Each structure stands twice: as structure tokens, then as C-alpha cells.
Image: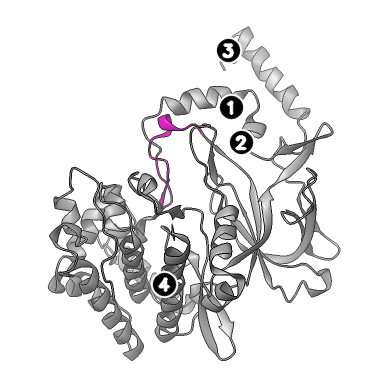
Amino acid sequence: MDVTDSAGRAAYISFIVSLCYCTDYELGYDPTVVWNADKKYWVIKCPDSTAAKDGKVRVVEYYARKQIIEAERIFGRHTRGFAASLNRNMVDEPDTFIKDAWPYESSDSQQTSQNELDIMKYIEKKLGGKSMDRLGIVRAKNGSIVCFSEAGNLVNDDTSAMLGSVFADFKVALSQTPTVPTTNNRALTEDNPAKSILLRVHQRMVLQPLGRPLHTLKSPYELIIVLADAMVAHSVILKKSGYLHRDISPNNIMVVDDGERVRGLLIDFDHAIKTDKSRLAIAERTGTLPFMSICNLQNSKVQRSELDDWESILYIVCWLGVHGVNRDEQVAYQQEIDAMCKDDEYYKPPLAKWEAGTFDDVAIAKKNDLEGDESFNDRVLQYFQEGAAYDELKDMARSLRLALFENPELGLLYSGVSVIRNIPDKPASRKGAKVL
């Protein structure tokens, strides 16, 4: 738009006038989440997936005093989380987690879209509700795609509705883009958008039980318990339902209080995939950079398996061992690092290369850090926080590294770091090897 000529000025004026006539929705206002200024809580309308199947869309209202997960940026999934209650009088004693996000969904009819709600319902069907509660697996009580009223019609809230006629141009531009860039340490499932025209859908889910973040733990001892619980749940889900999580990270393992002890809670099945041959053969990058397996980072032809998720657990142990388990330790560590960086502009904090650069850069950094006992000790373990509890965490990290990277039952090809130097021509499997 060039405002130095008459056509450009006319276009600019047209844009300003159109902006003035935009609906609240077109301006970005979400009518399904409203702040009650008098009561000082959010009123959140959630799609009721359990309502009568008569074609009508029903909603259930939940009440939340605070937002416990805030969207980190405008782009991406824009995930938000609320600690909520179905009873407005119990808003200060929430028992439910409301997950509000914009996951990808394919507009290509030949692609099979994944819906987290359907995945969780399938897992519950295979395991049973009581087993899920006992194992510490979050359950989806309700949810669906968010709808809004536009000119008297109910419309799914997605990018095609938001962009309108512009969406067609967007599809053309996206199909001509060779790769999707990653930001904020996130890897996109769809590495080649030309194969599938993507759109985002606004999805809201009601989840129970309500957990708390890992940084609220008191010690590494509690962390070990929580991680063990989460991976027991992970193994049972894989065995009973065939779904592989594929996004193990600190954000996706929560803490639940069970009397005087803590329990782990595995959440977020956005990237879970059925482990049949047709899907596992597809090379996909998923996860958060510091916690992605080397195979995942390299986008290798080695099929994804439970070993990739166990490798993510190793990186969580190392990351929290260095940065600290709870929020106070993490803040103190960051202050120390900031001071050192201020004194020495060339100083690189431990594990810094796990969260910066390209996928290949991070993969090579992890390979170098984990290639042998000496490297692992010099590059990672020596930077763990001090204390007997962190010594226990070091032992856990050593055991995991040995099981994943020097396990004779895996063989050279599948022992983690070797994948960087030796990627097979045909898809191979890392499934079934012993981890611990």
C-alpha cells in the first residue's frame, strides 16, 4: 500500500473505514471468556461434548479467579490455562483445569487430523476411568471446538473464519513455503506445509484433576517420584491404547497432592500419535527443543518410539538438576547466571546450547554432552545444584544415560548419539528395548 499515490491513499482510507466497522470478534475479542468486574472472576463458556446429540451446541459455564498459564506470544497455539470451578461459590477452591488453545488441524481432506479430546476419550475407553485416576492420567470431562454467533449463525472459531476470503491467499502462500520456521523452542509437527494446508482451530477442554507445576515441588526427591509416576502412566497408555505421547517436557508433567505425598500427572496429548506402522514411518518433529530426543531433532528415519520419550525424561532431569527444581532455586540460579554474563560477555551457561540454534545444532550439542561418562560429567553433572538430594538426581541421570546410550540390547544403530552419524536408509524401529 503506497500512500504517495491516489490508489494507495484510497486503499488506506478503505482499510481505516473497514476497521471502524469490524465486529468485536474481528477485533480479537473472545465473547466466550468474560471478566466479571464485580465478582472478580472469569466466566468461561466451555462446549458441552456430553450434551444430547441433537445437533445443537450447548455450553457449560465455569468460573476462574486466575489464569495459571498465560500465552507466551501471539503466534503459535496460544495456550492458556485456568484453574476453575463449575460452582461459582467455589471459585477460590478450584478443582478443574480449563485448557484453551489453538492447535493445528489440516484442511486437506486426505490428511487425518488429530483431536486431543478424541485421543483422551479413546485412552479412557481402553484404560477405564478408575485406572486413569489411579495411574495419574488427566481426564477430559468436556470440551470441543469453540463456536461463536456471527449474523445469527453458529461458526467454528478457526483461522478460516477469522481470515475470511484472505484464507485462500494464505493457503497459496503457505503451500509455496518450503519449511515452517520454529520459534520459542517449539517444534511444529508439520515440517512440510506444502503437503497439507494448515489452519488453527480454537479448542477448549475441561480437564481433571487439577495439578500444579513442577516448580512448586520442594525437593529433587519429590521430582523423582513425580517423574516415575508420569512414566508409569506413559508406559500403560502406550501398552493399552497404542498412543505415544511424544511431547514429554516439564510443562506436560504436573503435580497432584495425595495426602502427605505427591503424585505425577501426565497431561497434554496434543502430539500423541497411534503407534501403527503407517504413522510411525512418517518423520515428524514434535516437542520443546531442550527436551527433544536426538532422533527427533535430526528428523531421522529411525521411527519414533517410547525411547524418545524416555530420552526426554533424561533431559528434564539434567535441566532441572542444573537450573533447580523449585522456583526459588531457579530464580537464584538465573540471578547468578545474569551476574556472570554481565562480568563476561562471552560466558555461556551450562546447557545453553540445548535451547538455541537450529535443530541440528541442538542435536550435536546433546550428542557431545552425552557421548561418554567423562563428557557427561564435565559438561552436565558437575553443574547440578549442590546437596544430597541433587546427588540422587545425578545418579538417576547416569542410569538413564547408560540405559539409553550404552545399552547393549539396543545395538550401535539405536543407541541415541550414534543416530547422528549413522541414519539408516530404511525406517527402523527402536521399540521394545529395555530402558530401566
Q: Is residue 325 left or right of residue 417?
A: right
Circle 4 sits on which residue?
A: 231
For marks 2 and 1, the one nearer the N-term is: 2
Q: Contact, CB < 8 Å: mark 2 with mark 3?
A: no
Q: Amino acid at mark 3?
A: Thr
Q: Is residue 121 left or right of residue 189?
A: right
Q: CA distance from mark 2 to mark 1?
A: 8 Å
Nearer-N-terminus badge (1/4): 1
Residue 286: percent from the left, percent from the top? 40, 51
Mark 1 and mark 3: Cα distance apart in space: 28 Å
Label 4 – label 2 distance at C-alpha: 35 Å
Q: Which residue is mark 2?
A: 159
Mark number displayed over residue 167:
1
Q: Amino acid at mark 1?
A: Phe
Q: Mark 3 or mark 2, which is nearer the start of the sequence?
A: 3
Q: Is residue 137 magenta?
A: no
Secondary structure under badge 4? helix
Camera-side residue of 306 and 84: 306
Mark 2 surroundings: few (<14), some (14-19) or many (≥20) residues within 10 A: some
Instruction: Point out the stretch of residues depicted in magenta.
Output: 181-197
Name the residue tied to disc 3: 4
* Mark 2 or mark 3, whichever is nearer to me: 2
In three-dimensional space, the C-alpha distance between marks 1 and 4, rounded to whole angstroms, equals 41 Å
Callout 3 crowding tier (Cα within 10 Å): few <14, some 14–19, many ≥20:
few
